[in-house]
Image (tube, rainbow, N blue to C red):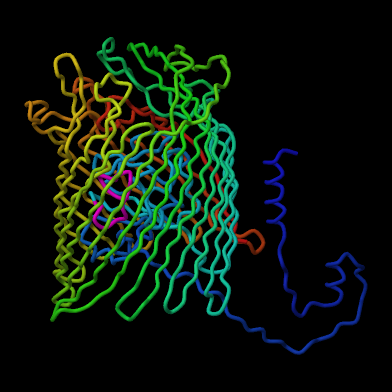
Amino acid sequence: MTKRKLALAVALAALGTSTVWMSGVSAAEKTDAHGGGTGSVDTYELDPVDVTGQRAPEPADTTLPGGFVEERPTVGMLGNQDVMDAPFAVSSMSQKAIRTFSSPADGVNGVLTLDPSVRVWSSHLYQDIAIRGFRTNGHTQYINGIPGMLGQYNIPYYWVDSVSVISGPNLGVSGTSLSEAIGGTVNYISKKAERKATEARISYLGGHSVEEAVDVSTRFGKADRWGVRITATNVGGETAIKHERLVRQNIFVNLDQHTEKSRTNFLLGYNHTKHNAGPSTINFDFSTLTKLPSAPDLSRSYKPSWSYNEYDNLLAVLNHEQKLSAHLTAFLNMGVHRENWYGYVDGTPKVFNEAGDFTISMSNWPLAFTRFYTGIGLRGDFRTGAVHHDYLVGLDRNRLHYDGDGKNFWSGTGNIYRDNDWANPGDPHASAPHDTNTLMLGWHVVDTMKAFDDRLQFTMGIHGHSVKDTPANKESKKTHAISPTFAVSWKFTPDVMVYLDHTESFGLGSTVSTTDGYKNGGERLDPAKTKQNEIGVKVKAGSFLHTLSLYQIRQANAVDVYRGTDKYRQLDGQQENRGVEWGFTGNIANRWDIIGGLSYMKVTQRKTSRGLNDGKPVDGMPHWSGSMGIVYHPTEAWSVIGRANYVGSTTINNDKIGVPSHFIFDLGANYRTKIDRTPVTISAMLYNVAGKDYWVARGASSTLGLGSPRTFTLSANFEL
């Protein structure tokens, strides 16, 4: 018997087990129940017995109407705030949203794109997203407020309780990150033990892929002081894309405790993944290609079946708060992340004609990252006359040890309109050599002032950091920067709020490529300054929350400069992202739950000192995008799910090649029932119902991603 069949047999056997309480049953019936005879026997009538007990309380509902968005999202180091108090465009997707709208191809990114700030920028392998036109991945994202604890690949999410997005550069209210989140901050909140519960789930993910999952939690100690929650998943099999095979095992353990004066949370996680022939991007040779080929069949393979990415991740994240007095709390945040990407045999097709012919080169490029984060500080409040102050003072330290290098070892040819595979030349497995050590020290001071019965709020923050970068066998480079944050909001009523904010951010500083012919290859450029101005309004109207925001983000550019025939990379000019976003969530007549948004964004290059690129569009940046998810409840048992996603047309190759728009629709249903006394939720989804083939634009790039094919999934979740 295979491991998968054995796991399924165990799950089915568990489902067939139930405890039956019998009261007032005759001896004959008891005898029959145990296989005895059916003859007449004496019967006895017992006195009535009253059994009393206390049902474990259900977790309090902390979401807005519709259940998709948390009412008190996490706003960086400022902690949880009411969504009507936060002077930023911020949304926190709930557990209901994650369960309903996550997908096999995009993972939790399928949920994040319901925020109008967010667009998908990649495919199954890396799952990059963009926030307001700037790329972000696991290296720039946060777990429980701590940066850099995730990898940049296919991110597991069964351990996630909610995930929040703060749009815009928000370094001033977030922990110091070595990998700057320019367009916004994504923060994953881990599941905590709310009560004693056990859930098991088995899912068909399309193709020949199956997932088994278990979620166990309990609380113990005086007043339920301690809680433990363990989540584990196992995924294996070929996906809906030919030759793509994903094998992944995850286990996450969350331990928390609370008393009147302290709160602690400790998350320990392990992830192993082997991903064969995972789709990523397609390159194009524009010296021979003058028109974009039509998108190929998304279920075909464009990589060798023997290509693979294999990696292990181990993370530990600690958060502790200690109440020192009624108005002062100390906090400690710590995190360690080890990402060992020891298996890397991969490459990217490069299409050179409209017939879809391509070349592909495979490289072996092992990587390894070790990140250490420590943050300490004080959070408190005081009054000056009629003004109430909530303040934070913090220091943090972020260190990265990076290993990585590789080389090409094989080349081949193929065509995007047919199935492709090539003979395996052998695995050139190699170890990653040491490359770079980076140390960043940061400090934060934030004061939120409230007056006029808290209707007026003014937040002022200053963040500073210094960086020491030491490449292997090279001299260290030191940089430093200061970033201010200002925000003001006014509540006209409890249901109408207007806000303005100005935020700035400085990154680590990019490294000039050593493979693109730059004379200053390997040089670390100074941090690029990013500034955002934003105005927005939040309105609660009946059972709906609307957020409308206008923003402008400007970031210093890295451009190519020639000195004679020598090419250099240097900072000059700006990229400007200007846009308007409308986000909404709520319900209609208690039967329709709705979430979604619409975005318009214009991205241009501003004039450099050499008069280049003034007002020119940036590659791969569609103006329009929008998404909407709907859940209809015809009965208490049934839910019907619909989701639509639209991305407008754009251009690549310096505004010369057009990329068409696409509209994708998903449809599904949930059914809640019981098997014996075990609650079961059966879910079915059909993604990309029309089976549309489409390209995915990737901002500031002339490469394109591949969309996801029509995929059917089916799952059963058991509350044991």
Relative image position of residue 449 (x, y in whole percent): 17, 70
Q: Is residue 236 above or below residue 185?
A: above
Report the front residue among 597 and 151. 151
Q: Is residue 91 left or right of residue 551?
A: right
Q: Going by the picture, which residue comes out furthest to the bottom? A: 47
Q: Could you tell me which residue is drawn at 57 percent across and 22 percent down?
A: 427
Relative image position of residue 708 (x, y in whole percent): 42, 33
Q: Could you tell me which residue is drawn at 15 percent across and 79 percent down?
A: 384
Bounds of the magenta span? 170-185
Q: Does the magenta-highlighted stretch encompass residue 674?
A: no
Q: Does the magenta-highlighted stretch encompass residue 184?
A: yes
Q: Is residue 113 left or right of residue 614?
A: right
In which quarter of the view is residue 113 placed? Answer: top left
Relative image position of residue 710 (x, y in whole percent): 45, 33
Relative image position of residue 406 (x, y in whole percent): 45, 25
Report the front residue among 213 and 159. 159
Q: Could you tell me which residue is drawn at 42 percent across and 17 percent down?
A: 416
Q: Is residue 117 above or below residue 245?
A: below
Q: Quadrant of the N terminus?
A: top right
Q: Quadrant of the C terminus?
A: bottom right
Q: Is residue 593 left or right of residue 450?
A: right
Q: Is residue 416 above or below residue 479?
A: above
Give the prevailing secondary structure in the magenta stretch.
loop
Q: Is residue 281 left or right of residue 711?
A: left
